[in-house]
Amino acid sequence: MAPLPAPLCLALIAALGFGVLLLWLELRHRLRPASPLRLDSHSWAVNEPATGSATEASPGAATAAITVDGVLRLSNPHARMEVMVPEVELRPTLLGKGDLSGVTITTRLTAAHPDEDSRADGYWAAYIVKSHKQTEARVTLTIAAPAGRPAAGAAEHQNDPLALIDTLWLEVLWINYGPFGRLQRRDGLLIPLRKPEPLQPATARWRAGEACQVLPLPTHLLGVLDDPAEVLRRYAGAVLQPGDILTIGETPLAVMQGRYQHPAMVEPSALARLLCRVFHPTSSLATACGLQTLIDDVGPARVLCAWLAGTLMKLVGSRGGFYRLAGEQARLIDDITGTTPPYDQTIVLGPAQPERTCRELARALGVPVAVVDVNDLGRVKVLAASEGCDEGLLLRALRPNPAGNANERTPLVVVRPA
């Protein structure tokens, strides 16, 4: 047999070397230290007693206190591994409509392990979450304000600072300790303290569009404690009629699905640190943590191949190749500052299974539903839509961005043909 030509040999060696590189990247990515523990929560309740008056004997007494109770659950789905949780810390942040400097918040975390008694002093003793087991902790937060403290920012509530508060952002900082080492975890959940009243047909202010009408619907800040169908039913149910199309922003849907994380939870690889430098500075992939989030979602081999192919395509005049090859999430990831507070300090991915979600929401609401991505530059992208959605109508109706991109809190928009 005649020997292969030298150029072909070099090409085969290069291809083999590149294949080995991709295999090494994937194995290194999949075998990196990770904890199997998962944190979720349930049974949250907000109790707001009537406001009391301060007395001369106790001028610093609180006028009222909002009490928030809930349960955190730590689960271990691993078949063999046991993981220790030596530390848990709660870090609450209040969001509202004015100056909250006079408001105080206290937290209490009480372990509720299935095989140990709770400590009366609230101390979190290091605990082992065994394979296929779970444990819980009860959370109590008390929000109070001193009497007579004026609240700047809203005249109607100047003597009641607590009335300015509408949202509690609770971060849970907890340590996972096991065969993978010692990992710092940082999870956050949003707890609505007050919700706006849904719009009614008599008070809804429709905006005229191109052969259509649009109605932005205000909601509370959305989070993992919200069910998308219930949110749409609460805020849109009264104004919907046959022929309407209900749209929801892709980011609000993603945060309800829990598809966000603090950058502290992201460990950028050498590949992420290197490739992030080639993206435009305004891109969400231009930071190591932003690009690593994409790598964690689709894998390092796909990201590297998409970058190489996209670079070659750009040389022959075809732009956007990376985003087409790297997958839908490459366009949808929002790095920090890319979303409304408090998610502005997190990295938010695009929603999971948007097509299936649209079908389920359409069945629940009785009108077509679409998940959209809209910005102030007139760019409208329909990520997914249920049967019966007129995409041309949506593009015309949403081009002026009626939902806004600031803190309007109108993630839902009803589109009605003229």
Image: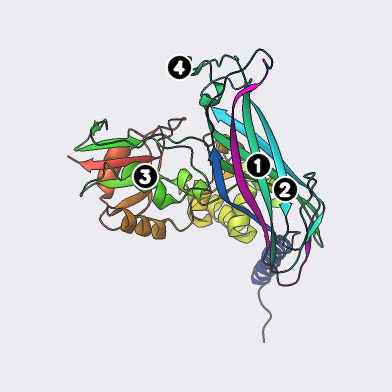
**Identity of the amino acid at label 4?**
Glu
**Identity of the amino acid at label 2?**
Thr
Q: Residue at x 42, y 55 (%)?
A: 354
Q: Residue at x 62, y 54 (%)?
A: 295
Q: Residue at x 49, y 56 (%)?
A: 352
Which one is earlier in the sequence, the residue at label 4 or at label 3? 4
Q: Is residue 267 magenta?
A: no
**Identity of the amino acid at label 3?**
Arg
List the residue tagged with mark 1: 140
- Report the quarter where the C terminus lies: top left
Left or right: 267, with 321 as reference point: right
Instruction: Report, in whole angstroms, how far the alpha carbon at label 3 lies from the one at label 1.
Output: 27 Å
Work out whether residue 272 can be spotted.
no
Instruction: Report, in whole angstroms, how far the alpha carbon at label 2 lies from the one at label 3.
Output: 33 Å
Number of other residues with Cα within 10 Å of mark 4, as a class: few under 14, some 14 to 19, many 20 or more = few
Work out whether residue 28 can be spotted.
yes
Badge nearest the viewer, 4 or 3:
4
Q: Is residue 62 magenta?
A: yes
Q: Position of residue 83 (x, y in %)?
A: 78, 61
Number of other residues with Cα within 10 Å of mark 1, as a class: few under 14, some 14 to 19, many 20 or more = some
Instruction: Report, in whole angstroms, how far the alpha carbon at label 1 lies from the one at label 4.
Output: 29 Å
